[in-house]
Amino acid sequence: MMETMISGGAVENSNAVRERALRTDYDALGEQLDRRGITIDAILAKVEAFGVAIPSWGVGTGGTRFARFPGQGEPRDVFDKVEDCAVINQLTRATPTVSLHIPWDKADASRLKQAAARFGLGFDAMNSNTFSDASGQRQSYKFGSLSHADPAVRRQAVEHNIECIEIGKTLGSKALTVWIGDGSNFPGQVNFARAFERYLDAMKDIYAALPGDWRLFTEHKMYEPAFYSTVVQDWGTNYIISKELGDKAYCLVDLGHHAPNVNIEMIVSRLIQFGKLGGFHFNDSKYGDDDLDAGSIDPYRLFLVFNELVDAELSGAKDFHPAHMLDQSHNVTDPIESLMLSAVEVQRAYAAALLVDRKALEGFQEDNDALMATQTLKAAYRTDVEPILAMARLNRGGAIDPVAAYRASGYRQKVAAERPASVGGGGGIV
């Protein structure tokens, strides 16, 4: 039996006062869906099998350019992060893997793998960091990394990514995510074409180091930390990169890396259509890359993204096996609570998308019936799938109400007593 950070009795006690009501709600929803020709148990089975990776960096308190206000019981190292991730999966049963960031999470890989195995956790994509300087680093990334004018800086960045691959091989990971902060803040600061050419050459060296069963995810971002231009600024450039590198290269879509009115679901459709969708960093935003909790601002957009994913799943799209990962920063909430609710919101969008009457939708599309087509989507989105999500957690030994169980367990207070308090500090501009 796998170890747990919260006692099984605490979860059982939390579920005991909620299970009867849940079963009543589940049966009622089942009757409603049956009238629509949908078998609720079939949807439940898909939801139970669905998982999203937790970002190791997400279990700590984030910050802004102005300041960071650490919370109680901050993880001291990657092993504390694994324990917090284990709590999230124990209560939600939706987050079986952890996505690491190197060098933030650098530790003995064999020991780390054993620590995660205690809780039944595996490892998702590895993430490299060439957007900030690490202690003792020979070359600085202040003016870029993989696209830097200095070959020595580019070589250092390539070697770091290869190191991430080697660590990931020991951990059992099968993918590397590369996001760079390279770009410019002033017109004329860099030559766009030469910077992109240097980036592609460096990425080809990283790609050559990939094991045969690995995938490489490249991530685009329209701005920040560079505000005039970024080397990988949009999905079109990202697609070019994936085509230039080869069959193991795919595009990663971070929901926060777009302008407010960009049609993200259409980008997802395009990448699926041409076999280059690698996966997601799920979060939400109001103005840009806010890294807010998934579904906290625009849950309908999250549903529309999953509408495209389910459509591809059901139609058997080629090269379709996207990675699902959260990527969030928690400044004013308990990170564990936010990550639990975000995982649930991603599951909610998936479950709702499974309810879309696709035959009816296709008919309305072919008839140019815009009103009924959009209402078909809304009918699925408006369905309260919470009983399905809660039943999936109950069936797999999780908590019907994860946040309530977590708060009742006293876990945060426990680790706060064990882990030294973190010190807050100023941000980058004050």
Image (tube, rainbow, N blue to C red):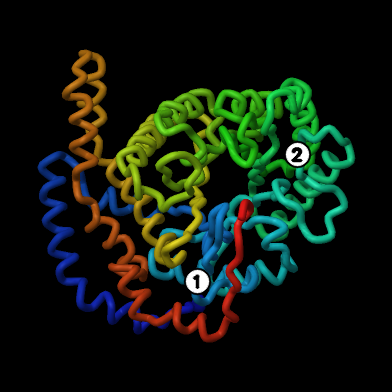
Residue at 35% in and 76% down: 407
Residue at 51% in and 58% down: 54
In-front residue for pair 125/70: 70
* Residue 41 image position (x, y, % from top left): 25, 53
Q: What numbered label is drawn on residue 144? A: 2
Seen in the picture, residue 391 relative to 364 is either above or below; the reply is below
Seen in the picture, residue 282 relative to 202 is either above or below; the reply is below
Seen in the picture, residue 13 relative to 348 is either above or below; the reply is below
* Residue 375 image position (x, y, % from top left): 18, 30
Q: What numbered label is drawn on residue 71? A: 1
In-front residue for pair 316/397: 397
* Residue 179 image position (x, y, % from top left): 65, 41
In-front residue for pair 171/108: 108
Residue at 75% in and 31% down: 199
Q: What numbered label is drawn on residue 222? A: none
**From the viewer's perspective, is 371 left or right of 307?**
left
Q: Is residue 101 visible?
A: yes
Element carrying mark 2: loop
**From the viewer's perspective, is 223 left or right of 137?**
left
The residue type indicated by label 2 comes to Gly
The residue type indicated by label 1 comes to Gly
Element carrying mark 1: loop
